[in-house]
Amino acid sequence: MKVVVAIDSLKGSLSSLEAGNAIKTGIQRVMPDAEVCVRPLADGGEGTVDALVSGLHGAYRTAAVSDPLGREISANYGILPNGTAVIEMAAASGLPLLSPAERNPLHTTTYGTGIQIAHALSQGFRRFIIGLGGSATCDAGIGMLAALGYQFFDSQGNLIPHPCGKQLGEVHRIDASHAHAALSQTTFIVACDVNNPLHGKQGAAHIFAPQKGANAQEVKLLDNGLQHIGRLFDATVQKAISMTPGSGAAGGMGAALLTYLNATLTSGSRLVLETIGFEKALSGAQLVITGEGHSDAQTLMGKLPFGVLNVARKHRVPVILMSGSITHRQQLLDAGFQAAIAITPPHQPLAEAILPDQARLNLINAVKKLSEG
């Protein structure tokens, strides 16, 4: 029997590969002769680099970058066998890099992500996958652009060297004449699973900035800044980039990538599934096991397990959902999952359940119970 395991990371606990290998251990204990194929997954956020590098036997590179507040850190990015550089924003511009007290998108910048891109360009890479999930920023990507040589000037002609969210409204002119020369020969594919515009009630500030530490007054200030910079972006390409679905992703990073790097935005989950060859892995499979930290009705709105289900259904391979916790079970079953299993025992505290060793044990035990019943 061939089983394909393709589970998202259990955030704060196990990576996608670690969770998949735990399920593999459980399967091999109850079915020693089973062929188990583990395919790590991610949706463009944290874990995307690891999923693609491990899934395709790529390699890692390390760059000295700056975190969202400008402090020097080291950040990894991936290199795939076909020469594609994979960068996830979370590595240099991510929310987990800041303490709760430090989180405020008025002051954070995507400059470090720009340094990562520049480092990969200096290594000769000309094809990029950029994952936009998990950012701590709302600077419309102008910090990233500054690291790549774009210059931002205020109304007095003064250079804004390391622009951040609170300076969006100060930008009067954008000069692209000093942009990194290699950008014109470079392709950017952006993994993005949100459709929000740059500004407005459904834009980057109103929808995402509160999660990054902004209060109501700061959200309004950021949205005004995004409207202002959006007009400059739109004028640059003579298109309404700021209203393009996905332009508001990662605090407006999508808009900068669309405007200045000629990027293509695509679904992060679909991109990863296609890049790792998930559909090919289904050849000869009798079962797929997928999952995530928590599954509910929102899983059916484009999350990774639903993407796995849609691909497997085309090949008539049944899919079992195995997640940390489950709500709306009947909706998940009605959508096509063969079973929906919560791996965490009913009375186990969350603080205990997310411990890596405990999470591994819970996955192994869930497979055992599945085989018994």
Image: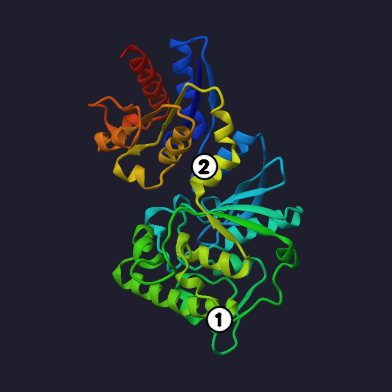
203 vs 65, left or right, is left
Residue 354: image location, x then y, percent: 37, 32
Q: Quadrant of residue 14?
A: top left
CA–CA distance in space, label 1 to label 2: 35 Å
Residue 88: image location, x then y, percent: 55, 50
Q: Which mark is residue 111?
A: none
Q: Quadrant of the C terminus?
A: top left
Q: Callout 1: helix, strand or loop?
A: helix
Report the residue marked by disc 2.
Answer: 47
Q: Quadrant of residue 356?
A: top left
Give the number of the mark in front: 1 or 2: 1
Assess disc 1: are there few (<14), some (14-19) or many (≥20) residues with their C-alpha within 10 Å of its C-alpha: few
> In the image shown, does 221 or 322 lie closer to the viewer?
322
Q: Callout 2: helix, strand or loop?
A: loop
Residue 233: image location, x then y, percent: 54, 76
Residue at image coords 59%, 76%: 237
Residue 125: image location, x then y, percent: 73, 53
107 vs 156, left or right, is left
Amino acid type of the residue that numbered disc 2 sits on in the rendered structure: Gly
> In the image shown, does 330 or 88 lie closer to the viewer?
330
Is residue 44 visible in this depiction of the protein?
no
Residue 221 higher or lower than 3, as above or below: below
Judging from the image, the colouring scheme is rainbow
Label 1 close to label 2 by CB (< 8 Å): no
Report the residue marked by disc 1.
Answer: 235
Amino acid type of the residue that numbered disc 1 sits on in the rendered structure: Ala
> In the image shown, does 309 or 207 lie closer to the viewer?
309
Residue at image coords 42%, 65%: 105
Residue 172 higher or lower than 334, as above or below: below
Residue 15 higher or lower than 303, as above or below: above
194 vs 282, left or right, is left
